[in-house]
Every structure is written in structure tokens, then in C-alpha cells.
Image (cartoon, rainbow, N blue to C red):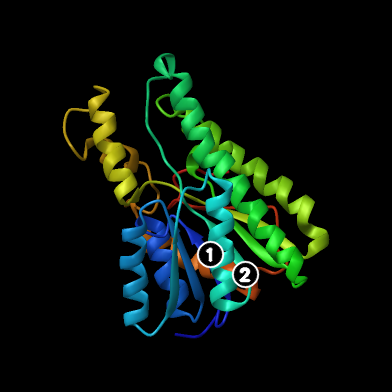
Amino acid sequence: MSGRVSGTRILVTGAGSGMGRSIARALAAEGARLTLFDLNGEAAEVVRDEIVSQGGEAVVSAGNVTVRADVAAAVAASVDAYGGLDVLFAIAGMIKPMHFLETTEENWRLTLDVNGLGTLICQQEAAKQMIAQGTGGKLILTSSIAGRQGYPNFASYCASKFAVTALTQAGARALAEHKITVNAFAPGVVDTPLWQKLDLDIMELGDTEKPGQAFAEFSGDILAGRAGRAEDVNGTALYLASSDSDYMTGQIVMIDGGMVLV
């Protein structure tokens, strides 16, 4: 531990599993004071217990990123526990693949609500607290390779991640005067519960024949020679949360092993 974010008050949404869990644990190991927000409160409590057992600090706030009161309560939990909020990681998201011509209004609205509107609400509520503190802050959003190019079975998801790019740039311009930076990281194919479910969903669409096939096929062109692991994102997350990234805003950092070159 080098203490790169020692004492930094950080809210992580989607902290109960996958990349959210991995990033939260990495931040705690570097001295961060965590507020763990997840729709599954019990999963977040497990992560909290893991962090505390290793000598870290973490509290839990359960809720839905599309419900402003829930997000405001998570920000308040950080204020109550640590006296303020310095960094937001907006990681919570969802994906439900559908063939392009069969994509429904319900699928579109749900995906855009969680990944787009939920991200905006998190930005707004965190930024309001940071502005009130007067000390600046960092908003770190979650994009995807699907925010760089469209995929036929993921139209709604791609649109939602392109929206994250817009929210990154809009937020960076809107909040610069308050010394708040806004950046995003963009993973590719990562072995997490989200991708494990996605693999099965693609099989149910009839596009693959066996579990693991979609994951393997999507991973086939990665220049690094393998699919991502949740911990592959941790280094970039620490960079974005630390003072090392103070002169960076409005940017999307690709962490995909060279799957998409832009």
C-alpha cells in the first residue's frame, strides 16, 4: 500500500460485485474511505466486511441509481460517515441484449434509464455536495467499448454508453469552474457476473450454441491475447481517483486490451 488516495472520501456505485467490488477493494487498500452503493444491499455489505477485515473503512447505502432520493442518501451517507465527498465512481449499469430489429421500447427505456439517467443523477448529486464543500472533486464514469462503436445485439446498451461519453464531456465543461473534473474509463470484455449473464443471454437469443461461446468469440480479437479481469481496471481507477489525474478532464480512457483502437 502506497496510500495514493489516503483519506479520500469516495462513493462507488455498483460496488457489490464485478468491477465495482474490485475497484472499491483496491481504493480501500490505498487508504480511501468508501461509501458502497448497490441495488443489492446485502452484496455491498459483504464487500464492506471484506474491506473492514483488512483494516479499511467502508459504509453501505443500498438503492437504485435511477432514484434521485437513493443517490442523495448515498451522498449523505458519505457526509455523515466522513464529513464530505471527494470522488464518485459511477459504475452501476445493466445490459440486456436483443436483436436490432426486435429491440423494444421497454428495453431501450430501462437501459437508458439505468446507464444514462442513472449516471447523470449520480453526477448531479455528487457535484452538488462537492460544490457546497468548495474543495473541488472528481467524477469518474463508466463507459465501454460499446461507447465507441455499435454492436447489432446491443443497440440500447451502445446508445447508453455513447450517452456516457456525452455526459463526461458535458459535465467536464459544466463543472470546471468548480474545480471538479469528469472522466470515464471504458472496459472491453471483462470476466465479471455481468458478462457471465450476458453470455447466457446471447445464447438464449440463438446466436451461440453453448455457454462461454459468446465470451470466447468477443475476446478473440483482443490484442493483449486474453479477456479482461476485474482487477485490470484497478490501476486506471486509482490514477483517476488520485491527484495524478488533476490536469485531466473530459476524457474516456480505454481499458480493453486493444480490442477497439481509437
Q: Which residue is mark 2?
A: 85
Residue 165's place in the image compared with 235, above or below, is: above
* Depicted 134 relative to depicted 53: above or below: above
Q: Give the SS element for disc 1.
A: strand
Q: Position of residue 125 (x, y in %)?
A: 64, 55
- Marks 1 and 2, the one that precedes in the sequence: 1
Pointer 1: what residue?
Answer: 11
- Looking at the image, residue 71 sits to the left or right of residue 60; the answer is right
Q: What is the quadrant of the N terminus in the image?
A: bottom left
Tell me whether the residue at label 1 lies in contact with that at label 2, contact meaning CB atoms closer than 8 angstroms: yes
**Residue type highlighted by circle 1:** Leu
Q: Is residue 135 above or below residue 229?
A: below
- 88 is higher (above) or lower (below) than 81: above
Q: CA separation, marks 1 and 2? A: 7 Å
Q: Quadrant of residue 220?
A: top left
Quarter of the image for residue 4 reads bottom right
- Image quadrant for the C terminus? top right
Give the number of callouts. Answer: 2
